[in-house]
Amino acid sequence: MLDQWLFTKEELLDTPSILDGVTHEQEQMDRTKGCHYLLAVGAKLNLPQLVLVTATTFFHRFFMRQSIRRFHVYDIAATSLFVATKVEENARRLKDFVNACAQKAQKNDRLILEEGSKDFVKWKDTMLHYEAILLKTLCFDLSIEHPHNSLNSLQMSLNVPDSCVRRSWILLFQSLGSPICVLYRPKVIAAAALLIAAHLSGEEIAERRWKDVDTDIGQVHELAAEMLEYYVDHCLGKTAQSSHPSQ
């Protein structure tokens, strides 16, 4: 059922949010913001990377069918992560989950909401309310094919070292805020990450080896350029800002 969740770039410019008057640029900024919040909550809860990949995929798919004007990205990000912990069988106590969401939303890691308190109940009820909407919007299609699952087979076909695979995992993680999961097939995403990793590692992938990979090499190069652009805009820029605090 993957095909129903693959969209063209033209469709990405015609989402429910854009039809609601949100610019494409603003929607992409909000997607990134929501995913960064999701990842921060996931890190607080010490969740494995595959849970985070599943959650961000739910998040991006949701906003291909719903408008950011109607649903706050933090609410859907938290709900996507909540559902992903169940799907990937990595659940956390509801109390811990709610507190992690509240702490990251308020940017206060010392914040503790007592069970039964007004704020705790509000967070819990909001998440459970949006869970039903999320599941319905996703047509209860919760099966996710991860790009990460293709890395090992691609490594053998392309003959790249383990260091490239490890760097590919990092690149895939850093790209979760981008909606590439609704634009490209998982194997293309994995191949693009490996192509970038090999280039950054000074490894040359022989052109003939791509013939052994059942994927569109043109799409791989196209996506690799997009992933690098996203990395420069959202990762390198952030690192530079944190390395040079204002005086």
Image (cartoon, rainbow, N blue to C red):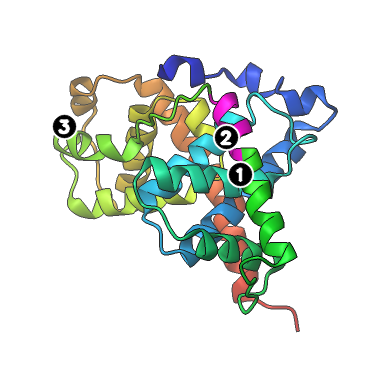
Tell whether label 1 touches label 2 (CB within 8 Å): no
Residue 89, above or below 122: above
Residue at (73, 44) in percent of width and height: 72
Quarter of the image where one finds residue 154: top left
Residue at (55, 30) in percent of width and height: 135
User: Is residue 172 visible in the rendered structure shown here?
Assistant: no
- Using the image as rendered, state which of residue 179 and residue 34 is in the foreground: 34
In the picture, the quarter occupied by the C terminus is bottom right
Mark number for residue 60?
Answer: 2
Classified by dominant secondary structure, the portion drawn in magenta counts as helix
User: Image check: 67 left or right of 202?
Assistant: right
- Location of mark 3 (residue): 157
User: What segment carries the magenta color?
Assistant: 131-138
Quarter of the image where one finds residue 2: top left
- Using the image as rendered, state which of residue 102 and residue 158 is in the foreground: 102
**Of the residues shown, which amino acid type is indicated by label 2?**
His
User: Closer to the N terminus: mark 1 or mark 3?
Assistant: 1
Q: Residues within 10 Å of mark 3 (few under 14, many from 20)?
A: some
